[in-house]
Amino acid sequence: MFYRWHVGTVAWVLHRLSGALIVFYLVLHIWVMSFLQKGPESFNRVMHLLENPLFKLLEIGLLGVVIYHSLNGIRLVILDLGYGMAHQKKMFWAVVVVGIVIFVLGAVPLYPF
Amino acid sequence: MEITFKILRFDPDKNKKPYYRKYTVKVEPGMTVLDGLNEIKWRQDGTLAYRRSCRSAICGSCAMTINGVNRLACNSQILALKRKTVVVEPLRRFPIIKDLIVDMDPFFEKMSIIKPYLITHSPAGLRERLQSPEERKLLDEPVTCILCGACTSSCPSYWYNKNYLGPASLFKAYRFVFDSRDEGTEERLRIISDRDGLWRCHSIFNCVEACPKSLNPTYAIAELKKKIVTTKL
Ligand code: HEM
Ligand code: SF4
Ligand code: FES
């Protein structure tokens, strides 16, 4: 029982995934920041751990996730206001293109190698 | 041209689970999926069950999933699908009665929840309640709906929550909320802003892709969302 993935279906699934990932990151972020309470020593140790290139790469991934969620979020708000209903697919591709441009601009300075 | 029909079959008296069965049909240009099903039922296997009546896309009986998209069988030419195999399944998320026939009761129950009739409180005059052509124009899309169910059965929000009113029912709500003669707006807006109402719409647009009458239920739902946030309930 396969049902075709339309453009709008893909946009929705990605939006939900990205929303959940950002919430997951937010929790992680608050947890990491909570080391501040334990004094400068332990906070510095955690920060040092995060200098690992692996985390830089994850950060680049997060950038992509946030960019997609924000841009598609704007697409959804525009559609909810009743504009561009006949152009929702084009608007998705605009999200992809603009997203890739912002992603590359943001990812280059973050790239650890 | 020989085309294989792969049809989801289910007879609750005989089968535990639905299963696929293949048929080969000689297809002429212009033949619709409904013609193909007729060919199978009349010449190959009389036990195949499906609904149809008008064979001209107006009664809304023959909505089914064809190659993974909801369409009307009578409105879909086989060769235009451009596949050697045509997969035909009943509308998903409605209980199967037999083969391609599903129980549409849940669909029509949701239609009646939104009170699909003109509500008036002001006394009736001596003449009809008139509309201007502009006021009438707002209703062009929703009154074209043939209640086929293709949209509701294509909606991921409905797949995961069968209590969700669904695009067709909300489209019908739009038809009355935006009817200049109707006086039941508040009542109806309360009903559709219920937890299983229009906030379950995530503007996925599967309903727009599925609608055989090229209507846009998502637009209607967005207009209703706006109406609700700008109306004091
Ligand atoms: C510019 C920033 C953002 C915009 C424009 C935006 C927009 C949206 C919109 C319009 C929705 C509703 C989608 C729907 O109805 O399906 C949504 C859902 C959601 N957002 Fe955001 N959002 C933004 C930032 C964030 C952030 C920072 C987080 C996490 C902390 C987040 C987490 C979520 C989650 C979990 C959902 C629910 C997903 C779903 O229902 O499919 N969003 N966002
Ligand atoms: S809106 Fe379109 S798909 Fe939905 S019931 Fe009406 S005609 Fe069928
Ligand atoms: S048979 Fe009436 S809509 Fe297809």
Image (cartoon, coloured by chain):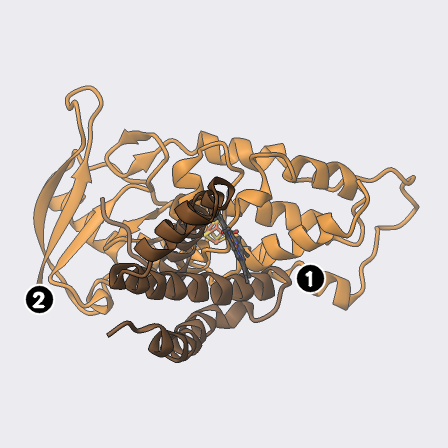
Chain colours: A brown, B orange
User: Residue tagged by mark 1?
Assistant: B138
Instruction: Say if mark 1 contacts mark 2, CB within 8 Å.
Output: no
Q: Quadrant of the C terminus of chain B?
A: top right
Name the residue: 66% across, 57% down: B223
Crowd tier of the residue under label 1, counting other residues whose Cα lies within 10 Å: few below 14, some 14–19, many 20 or above = some
A81 or B151, nearer to the observer? A81
Other-residue count near label 2 (Cα within 10 Å), few / some / many at <14 / 14–19 / ≥20: few
Q: Secondary structure at mark 2?
A: loop
Type of residue at label 1?
Leu
Which element type, helix, strand or loop, lies under badge 1? loop
What distance separates the C-alpha of mark 1 from that of mark 2? 45 Å
Looking at the rendering, which quadrant does residue A107 occupy? bottom left
Residue under numbered circle 2? B1
Q: Residue at x 37, y 57 (%)?
A: A14
User: In the image, what residue occupies the spot 13% across and 40% down?
Assistant: B20
At label 2, which amino acid type do we have?
Met
Residue B60 bears which disc, if any?
Answer: none
